Image: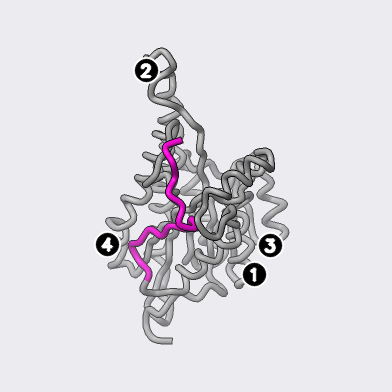
Amino acid sequence: MHKNEGMEISGAGAVVTGGASGLGWETSRVLARAGARVTILDLAGSNGAARAEVIGGSFIETDVTDEHQVAAAVARAAEDAPLRIAVNCAGVATPAKLLDRDGDPAAGIETFERVLRINLLGTYRVTAHAAAAMARTEPTQDGDRGVIINTASVAAFDGQVGQPGYAASKGGVHAMTLPLARELARHAIRICTIAPGIMETPMLAGLPEAAQESLGQQVPYPTRLGRPGEFAALVTSIIENGYLNGETIRLDGAIRMAPR
């Protein structure tokens, strides 16, 4: 392997936020299957402990909005194996409009702030602590220290009515990718972002089948919902491709969301 050709997953320590369900769980499974020592970071009410047992990994109860919890979780994960991979999947998509039906400011500012705290500030917080741990890690034989992969959304570019908070938070995740990649270059740490389209997640699974089919029909090709396995496959591709850095990749079947 030539220098900087890519990161070896086998034997690396990995943290996955939101790793107990949806895209995060599939990513945790795929990384563990590839030989990574995976630590799932998720909320107390999740089934993270059971999920970690399935893949032979660890679970640490973590709220990404809590600085002390994140710092402690990343430090503990780095004790299990050299931390070289961090994937941020934790997020919420709570809708809230700017104005109510009477044209007055809607009581949605609290929702807007909460979505930003989880999706944007939470991602930044985990990224900061993961990068600090990686920077203290001995580089691999090929000179790499780590890879950080964050999750945005096509809403960062095609935000719909009722999504100002979600779109702003995911737009922020996209916007910070390049400056962080530039900063972390001196530490031999790469960072990329994935912007999924309409994916088969627990959130969508709660919709009627007809509604799911309708959403899938909006995708040009393939005309269906995206699969968690496709997200996880892109995660591994980014890790293994040493020249991918500072980029946001849409994973969406070429969809462009309508206003509503």
C-alpha distance separating marks 1 and 4: 31 Å
The secondary structure making up most of the magenta span is loop
> Any mark on residue 33, and which?
1
Question: Foreground residue, 48 or 103?
Answer: 103
- The amino acid at mark 1 is Arg
Total numbered circles: 4
Query: Where residue 242 sits: x, y (%)?
Result: 39, 74
Query: Where residue 46 sits: x, y (%)?
Result: 65, 43
Q: Are marks 3 and 1 in contact (CB under 8 Å)?
A: yes
Whether residue 219 is visible, yes or no, is yes
* Residue placed under numbered mark 2 in the picture: 105
Q: Nearer the viewer, mark 2 or mark 1?
A: 2
The segment highlighted magenta reads 244-260
Q: Residues within 10 Å of mark 3 (few under 14, many from 20)?
A: some
Q: Earlier in the sequence, mark 3 or mark 4?
A: 3
Whether residue 73 is visible, yes or no, is no
- The amino acid at mark 4 is Arg
- The amino acid at mark 3 is Ile
Quarter occupied by the N terminus: bottom left
Q: Earlier in the sequence, mark 3 or mark 2?
A: 3
Residue that appears at 35% across and 45% down: 172
* Residue placed under numbered mark 3 in the picture: 55
Above-or-below relation of 143 to 220: below
Query: Where residue 224 sits: x, y (%)?
Result: 59, 54
Q: Are marks 4 and 2 in contact (CB under 8 Å)?
A: no
C-alpha distance separating marks 2 and 1: 49 Å
Disc 2 secondary structure class: loop
Q: Earlier in the sequence, mark 1 or mark 4?
A: 1
C-alpha distance separating marks 3 and 1: 8 Å
Question: Foreground residue, 212 or 105?
Answer: 212
> Any mark on residue 182, and which?
4
